[in-house]
Amino acid sequence: MPAILDALNLNGLLVPVQSVVDETLGILPNVLGAALIFALGWLVARIVHQLVVNILSGIGIDRLGAETGLANTMGETRISDIVGLIVYVLILIPVAIAALDTLNISAISDPATNMLNMILAALPALFGAFLLLAIAYFIARMLGNFVASILAGVGFNRLFNW
C-alpha cells in the first residue's frame, strides 16, 4: 500500500499509512509472543489438570468422598475434578498475566498482576477456611449419625406411628 501511494505521488496519504504499517509491524512480535506464551501455558495447564485428576482418582480420593458422604452433596462432580480445576486455574491465571505483560499494555497487565497478588495472598486463608469447613462437615455428620442412632434406640422414630 505505501509503495502504491508513493508511485502515485500521494505523499500526504503516505505518511499516515506508513506510520500505521510501522506500528503494526512493531506490535506484531509482542502479539505473537503473547499468543505463544498463552498457548504453551494453556497446554501445560491442561496436561497438569489431567495428571492431577488421574492421580487423585488413582489414589482413591473420589471413593473417600463417596464413603464420607461428601459425594452426595456434590452430585455428579468428583473431588478429583474440583481439585484439578483449581490447579488448572492457578496455572492459567499467571500464564495469562505473563501473556498480557508481553503485550506491554500496562493498563491491562498492572491490574491483572495486582489481582494475581491478591489471589496468592488469599490462598492460605481460603485453604484454612476449606479445612475448617471440612472438619465441621465431618463432625456434624458424626453427631447427626450419633443423635439419629440414640433417638432410634429410644424409639423416637416410632413415636408418631398410630
Image (cartoon, rainbow, N blue to C red):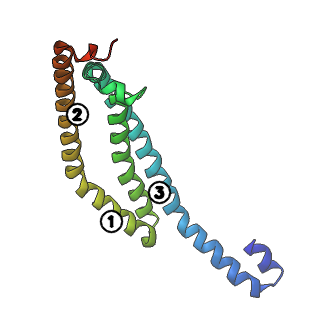
Residues at marks 3 and 2 touching, judged by CB atoms closer than 8 Å: no
Judged by depth in the image, the label closer to the viewer, 3 or 1, is: 1
Q: Tag 3: residue type?
A: Ala
Q: In 3D space, how far apart are the residues under numbered discs 3 and 1 (Cα atoms)? A: 19 Å
Question: Which residue matches tag 1?
Answer: 114
Judged from this view, the residue extending furthest toward the bottom is 12
Residue 59 in the image: state x and y as whole percent: 25, 20
Q: Where is residue 116 in the image (x, y as percent from the top left)?
A: 32, 59
Name the residue: 58% across, 67% down: 25
On screen, residue 8 versus residue 96, left or right, reads right
Dot 3 or dot 2, earlier in sequence: 3
Tag 2 secondary structure: helix
Asked which quadrant contains residue 143, the reply is top left
Quadrant where the C terminus sits is: top left
Mark positioned earlier in the residue sequence (1 or 2): 1
Mark 2, other Cα within 10 Å: few <14 / some 14–19 / many ≥20: some
| Residue type highlighted by circle 2 | Tyr
Question: Which numbered dot is residue 34?
Answer: 3
Residue 4 can be seen in this image: yes
User: Amino acid under label 1?
Assistant: Asn
**Can residue 51 be seen from the camera position used here?**
no
As rendered, which of 101 and 68 lies closer to the eye? 68
Mark count: 3
Give the secondary structure at mark 3: helix
Which residue is disc 2 drawn over? 137
Residue 91: x and y in percent read 35, 46
Residue at 42%, 72% in the rendered image: 106
